Structure formats: C-alpha cells, structure tokens
Amino acid sequence: MNYRLAFLGFGNVGRALAELLLAKRDELKSIHDITFTVTGIATARHGQAVDASGIDLPLALELGRNGRPLNALSAGPVPDNFLEFIRCSGADLLFENTPVNYETGQPAVDHLRTALELGMHAVTANKGAVVHAYHELSELARVMGRHFFFESTVMDGAPIFSLFRSALPVVRCKSFEGVLNSTTNLILTRMETGESFEDAIAYARQTGFAETDPAGDIDGHDAAIKVAALMTVLMNTPTKPGEVAYSGIRDISMEMVADAKANGERYKLICSAEFDGQKIRGRVAPRRVSSASRFYGIEGTSSMIHFETDVLGEFSLVENDPGPQTTAYGLLADFINAVRN
Ligand SMILES: NC(=O)c1ccc[n+]([C@@H]2O[C@H](COP(=O)([O-])OP(=O)(O)OC[C@H]3O[C@@H](n4cnc5c(N)ncnc54)[C@H](OP(=O)(O)O)[C@@H]3O)[C@@H](O)[C@H]2O)c1
C-alpha cells in the first residue's frame, strides 16, 4: 500500500529521516508492502513544497543540505501557514519535527492535533508535544482510528514507548533511572580528560550535539522534559517539566571531576522517577558514581535507562553513540507501526 507523507520541519532530524526512508525503500516494499510518496515538506525559513503527485525527495535533500529554499519543488503556490500546509499536503501521516518548546509544546501540539483531526497519523520527535498534550492527542488519535507515536523523544530510536505499548502489555513501570542527556554526558566525559567545561561545550557544539545555546541541556531542562514524558506515558502520571526537581551540570568543576576520577568515580547526570510513599516524583541531578554503578560505563553521547517493573523485574536499555540517524529510525519505526496496526 502507498502512503502519502508530509514533513513539517526539515532540519537535522527531518533530513536524516528522508535519507533513511530512501535507504530502506526496498525493504519497506518487500517486507512490509509499504511504499510512500512525499506530498509536502515545510520549514520555517527555507520554504515549503506541496505536490500531490510526489516531491523529488533526493532533490529536496540536496536543497535542504545546502540551505536553499524548497519552493521550486512545489506544484503550485505554497500555503501561508503551517496548519494550511498540513491540510494541503493531503498526507496519510505527518512527521512533526520542529524545535521543542519546553513551556507550552507549541506550535507542535497544534500541528499534531490538526493532522489527527484531518485523519492522518501523527508522528513526532518533539518532546514538548508529549508532556503538554499526550492524553489529548492520544485520545484524539483513538477517536479518529489513527496513531500518535513519539518513539524518538527519549533515547532517540531505542524502543522505549513501543516496548511497553506492544511487547510488554500490562507490565507496569514502577520506577526508572537513566542517563538520558547526550550533551551533558559528552561534556562530563571530556572533562575527565582534563578539558575545561567551556572547551567541552565548544566541542559538543562543533560536533552538532549541543545547540548554539546549550543551556537547555546544561541546566537540566532537556533531561527534565524527558523524565516528565516517561512519567506521563509509562507511569500514568501526567507531569510537566517544572514538576520535576532538576539541576544540571553547571556547578560541576574540573576539580570535582578530577577528584572523582582519582577515586575511581565519575559524575553522571541521573534522571529518575520513583514512588516515595505518597506520590511519584521525578528528579534530575548530577551524581558521583563508582565503577560498581550501572551508569559508570556510559560514556560520551551514549545513554541508558534502567526500569523496575511489577511483573518483569528489572531490565535496562543502552544506546551507544546515537545521532540523527538513530532519531530518524525511531520515526521510521513509528511510521511502520502506525500503518501496519
Ligand atoms: N537532533 C537530534 O538528534 C534530536 C534527537 C531527538 C529529538 N529531537 C527533536 O527533533 C526535533 C527536530 O530537531 P532537529 O535537530 O531536526 O532541529 P533543527 O535542525 O533545528 O530543524 C528544525 C526544523 O523545523 C523548522 N521550524 C522551526 N520552527 C518552526 C515552526 N515554528 N514551525 C514549523 N517549522 C519550524 C526549521 O525550519 P528552518 O530549516 O527554516 O529553520 C527546521 O526545518 C526537535 O523537537 C528536537 O528536540 C532531535
């Protein structure tokens, strides 16, 4: 079966997804009988393209990589706002990959709601939409007979949400603990080699792991929103990032890292949620861990999550050296899971 796809956001993640779709085109067809036509691509400052007969995806990638506008690929005039773009794309599934808004989740929430109201599946890597509208969008998807999936929002393509949703029916997540922010883990790992905090940030920026303004990672906002997303979805505890007690790594000095290293220990930014006897509480805080800790060996941009469950005991997922291609995989898996269900 052929599916019409729309991309809202064609940055690092959107383009990596386009590349992966092209690379996996034959397997999608031969294993899952899935073919696709991209009918819309929209960006904030690099134009849009809408074409019901199919946009030339390799050409769109070339334009996107070179920062050139996409409008030349459009079959006609482009819509003047993103909600109209979603409607005009006539897609069966929207990939929403615009930047995260920690405070409100917008405009991603409106984009995803519009797609679902129009009868599209809605797939995103945007954490904001999950913490601010998970229940609303999931219920809307159910009513419309469609899916709202967001595997890539935590630990990129590692299967967390689909694991609990599909492979582990009725398993209850009682608590979790993890290293979930790649940028801070990379900075702490580099500081162990004697690099300063500032130089480690510069390296993280240079290699594309940190934003131009890396405060969201360094001060723990990104980790807190991931904790909130996991609590909301896996522990049935709707949580906003501000309800997670969080601190970042700004106060971890080179001396502290060196002292830990001299004692066979390391600093890690640990994300967790557990029941404290009264309620489930989320927390993000740096912790000095010994070599006996499961988190000690998680270096660089790698991440890990450890779950405690009611019937399956404890288990962990580890992701080594993720990048936009692993985030793209989570989106591709969501696409396949959405349409084959
Ligand atoms: N990068 C990762 O490895 C990673 C991992 C997990 C999750 N995510 C999430 O994935 C999403 C996309 O990340 P990214 O790295 O691809 O970001 P990015 O490179 O900055 O790309 C964002 C895209 O969205 C467009 N855009 C910006 N504001 C918009 C708006 N208000 N409405 C519509 N489109 C808008 C941008 O247009 P222009 O091109 O014109 O600027 C660009 O095409 C984010 O929510 C991020 O948190 C990223």
Image (cartoon, helix red, strand yellow):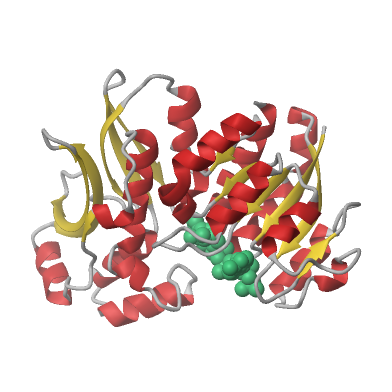
Query: Residue 309 is drawn in which quadrant?
Result: top left
Q: Is residue 317 above or below residue 132?
A: above
Spot occupied by residue 209 in the image (x, y as percentages of width and height):
45, 67
Residue located 47% across and 50% down the image: 153
Q: Is residue 253 above or below residue 58?
A: below
Horizontal side of 131 relative to 331 (left or right) equals: left
Judging depth in this view, the residue of 292 and 336 nearest the camera is: 336
Horizontal side of 205 relative to 64 (left or right) equals: left
Residue located 17% across and 70% down the image: 252
Spot occupied by residue 266 in the image (x, y as percentages of width and height):
18, 59
Residue located 87% across and 69% down the image: 77
Query: Residue 202 is drawn in which quadrant?
Result: bottom left
Judging depth in this view, the residue of 147 and 174 nearest the camera is: 147
| Whether residue 322 is visible | no
Residue located 25% across and 72% down the image: 191
Horizontal side of 13 relative to 106 (left or right) equals: right
Tell me the quadrant of ligand 1. bottom right
Q: Quadrant of the C terminus?
A: top right
Q: Is residue 280 above or below residue 91?
A: above
Horizontal side of 262 relative to 174 (left or right) equals: left
Spot occupied by residue 324 in the image (x, y as percentages of width and height):
55, 58
| Whether residue 56 is visible | yes
Q: Quadrant of the N terminus?
A: top right
